[in-house]
Image (tube, grey):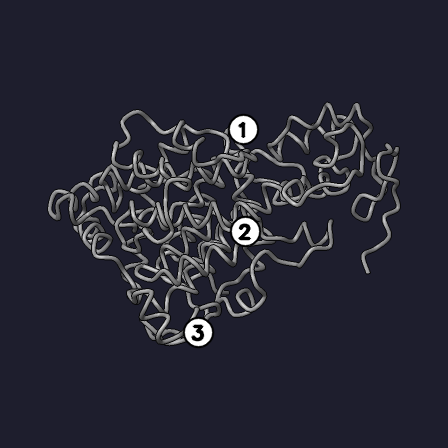
Amino acid sequence: MPPENPFTKGNNYDHAPYSDLDKPLPTEGHFYELHPFKSDYELVTRYTDLTGFDLLETPSEHQSSRQLSLQAERIRRTWGLEATADNTIGRDVDDQELITRLDRSIGIILGLACGDALGRPVEFMSSSEIEAEHGTVTKFFGDGSHNQPAGTVTDDTNLALYLVANLLAHGEFNAARYAEQLVEWFESDPFDVGVTTISSITWLQNGVPASEAGHKTLESRGANNAAGNGSVMRCAPLAIAYPDDQQMLQEMSRKSSEITHADPRCTHGCAVLNLTLAAILNGSEEPLQVALTALSDDAPAELVERLERVPDEVSEDDLENSGFVLDTLETALYYGLTADSAEDAIVSAVNNGGDADTIGAVAGTIVGARFGAGWRLYRVDHKPDSTFPARWLNDLRMDIDSYEDYIIPDLLEAGQLTERGIKTGSKIARQSRKLARNSGRA
């Protein structure tokens, strides 16, 4: 049975348990002071101003708190800041109000990995072939397209985790270093690499700068053969690091893409996905519309017109499953924005066939942001303990605990702290780099 709630709904309280300490619950006045702060840094520091209590670990000039986002979660959970729209503490709330930015950020990474791992063994199969051979794919299994163990992720997750490591190591996106990481990853002989990515990495190996390699590939392969989904599949961590700065998020999204995929449909496609994720992190009910409105004026008309149709003017029967970036985005956004659960979106995207791992991964980032990882719903509202099925999380070949407990919290606060000259702890950055090199496994 759920623990008994010690508070009467609709009342304010002077004190309530806060973690293992006795901390004050806010009055209405506190709520009005704190509610505008979506930034964890601003919330926690304002909390200390109001209450006189210290941070769990004070950020320094050279190192983040490594606890900031977690402390903000505790404040929101104990104080019930999401639960005070009617000016009271402890009212009934809906599930969406209980999903905070940290939970959504963790969901982005877990959703990406789950969609990737579910789709990997059926990559390149048509939907009818999947149905004939496997029925409806709802659980991880081994062998398949790449003859790997169940729960193995591909380059989609691998390169996203390298991007996480890059952001934590530098406090911002470092394109030159990420290009070096791509070469390092490629030379480790991964089992799944896209042809456009191979071409661009070859240019990098030959000394072409990060800002030019993707353009060299575009020139040599042509626009009809260089607009794949190899950059949009890996770009989601940028939305976690830059959720509040649309201009910076677009710039970094395009810059990260052009290292391998310089076609404007790819560079701006990454921007659309990340702007959508950031809008979800900020509580928007129309995230794709927010993204398209914010998109820079030089975005390709083909991209904008294709995505403006999603979801209302798109029929599920007409969804494409190719590796063309516009096909991937349209299908992933459709499933990601319309599904009633994370599992439904990922299963539908994967069983649509084709480039199943990447479409599943991109759809997974969207539903991961929409529904979060699920742990707050479990702790606060006693819902199932995860947004994603236990059979997936148990079999996913990835160190989930490290990403949930400190890597993603640090990534989320990195964007909030860098402008203040506060850097992520080097230990966390080294651990994230080590995990990325091992496909997310400890």
Q: Quadrant of residue 283?
A: top right
As measured in the structure, the alpha-carbon distance from the residue carrying label 1 to the one carrying label 3 is 46 Å
Q: Amino acid at mark 2?
A: Asp
Q: How many marks?
A: 3
Query: Seen in the image, is 269 located left or right of residue 24?
Result: left
Dot label at residue 141: 3
As measured in the structure, the alpha-carbon distance from the residue carrying label 3 to the one carrying label 2 is 24 Å
Q: Amino acid at mark 1?
A: Arg
Q: Is residue 312 visible?
A: yes
Dot label at residue 420: 1
Q: Position of residue 190 (x, y in %)?
A: 31, 65
Q: Does dot 3 land on a helix, a strand or a loop? A: loop
Q: Position of residue 37 (x, y in %)?
A: 64, 28
Dot label at residue 143: none
Q: Is residue 428 visible?
A: no
Q: According to the image, label 2 marks what residue? A: 340
N-terminal of the pair, mark 3 or mark 2, is 3
Give the number of the mark in front: 3 or 2: 2
As measured in the structure, the alpha-carbon distance from the residue carrying label 2 to the one carrying label 1 is 39 Å
Q: Amino acid at mark 3?
A: Phe
Q: Position of residue 110 (x, y in %)?
A: 51, 55
Q: Looking at the picture, does residue 346 appear above or below residue 397?
A: above
N-terminal of the pair, mark 2 or mark 1, is 2
Q: Does dot 2 land on a helix, a strand or a loop? A: loop
* CA neighbours of label 3 inside 10 A, class few (<14), some (14 to 19), many (20+): some
* CA neighbours of label 1 inside 10 A, class few (<14), some (14 to 19), many (20+): few
Looking at the rendered image, the quarter that the N terminus falls into is bottom right
